[in-house]
Image (spheres, rainbow, N blue to C red):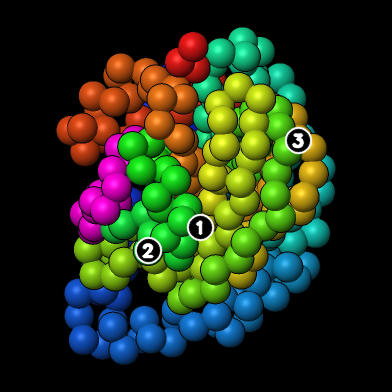
Amino acid sequence: MKDRNKNSASADDISLQERIIHILYKSIPGRLLLKILTRPFLSKAAGCFLDAKISTVLIPGFVKRNHIDMDDYVSCEYDSFNAFFTRKIKPDRREIIKDWDALIAPCDSRLTVYDIEENSTFMIKDRSYTMEELVRSKKLAKHYAGGQLLLFRLTVSDYHRYCYPDDGVKTKNYRIPGVLHTVNPIAAGEHPIYKENTREFSLLHTEHFGNVLMMEVGALLVGRIVNRDQEASVKRGEEAGMFEYGGSTVILCLEPGVASLNADIRKRSAEGIETVVEMGEQIGRRIS
């Protein structure tokens, strides 16, 4: 597993972020401001600024605050902050496991695993959600009952491109519009983040892990989830898309009896602890 201290924000940075989120979600003035901040038009305006050349002034401070090792990334000049934020990693910095029985992580993230049971709720960041609320489909919720939900939470210091977990054929992208909230755990205690946030999902008819539902969730001040394909044949490790600025989330839903997650990941998840993973690394095994 990834070194938990690598590319992590300092305690002071995290403390400041937590204080800001606390004010926004726990105070009356903060909640009034939040009504404006969570409107899609503001997210679009922020996206326009982050696409502009002037936004490059933000890059040096961002790299320093978040302790990002730029040696991991393809060297180039960025014409905007978003171009930097969606920078490409060097191919040799992420190994895609070739073992077809290995279930891989689709992105750099903090992973939590949940069991999906029919007509039951599960906890995502101190809040209960049903599968039906997440996908807005009773049929899909029923199909994945008895399976597993894998939640990959990206932080701002993570690599913000994600890949397909297996070879197969994907459906078109289904978009669920919504209000954009931060995916910070404090905010999740106040708002049903993964129900309200804008999100997209597709179904991957994979060769080794059945029908996988893959969902991308936007966050506060994220204007775009950029998925590369609509209906297409896809390959394991092939880039599926990327998030522009902000902490964001990828979710994989697995059918019952498809895969067994690594014991340490299951144990930490049961204890409410996230596991730091890198794109392409093994997180479980196919059940034969």
Q: Give whichever of discs 1 and 3 has the lower sequence position.
A: 1
| Residue tagged 3 | 234
| Residue drawn at x 66%, y 25% as measured from the top left | 207
Q: Nearer the viewer, mark 1 or mark 3?
A: 3
Kindly state the secondary structure of the residue where label 3 is placed.
strand
Q: Residue 126, percent across and down?
A: 21, 54
| Residue drawn at x 75%, y 71% as measured from the top left | 52
Q: Residue 8, percent across and down?
A: 42, 38
Q: In this view, does 273 lie to the left or right of 52?
A: left
Q: Does the magenta stretch include residue 202?
A: no
Location of residue 263 by image quarter: top left
The answer to whether 38 is drawn above or below residue 259 in the figure is below
Q: Nearer the viewer, mark 2 or mark 1?
A: 2
Q: Give the range drawn in magenta.
A: 111-128
Label at residue 133: 2
Looking at the rendered structure, the kind of residue marked 1 is: Val
Looking at the rendered structure, the kind of residue marked 2 is: Glu
Q: Distance between the residues labelled 2 and 3?
A: 28 Å
| Residue tagged 1 | 217
For this rendering, which residue is in front, 74 or 247? 247
Is residue 108 in view from this perspective?
Answer: yes
For this rendering, which residue is in front, 23 or 240? 240
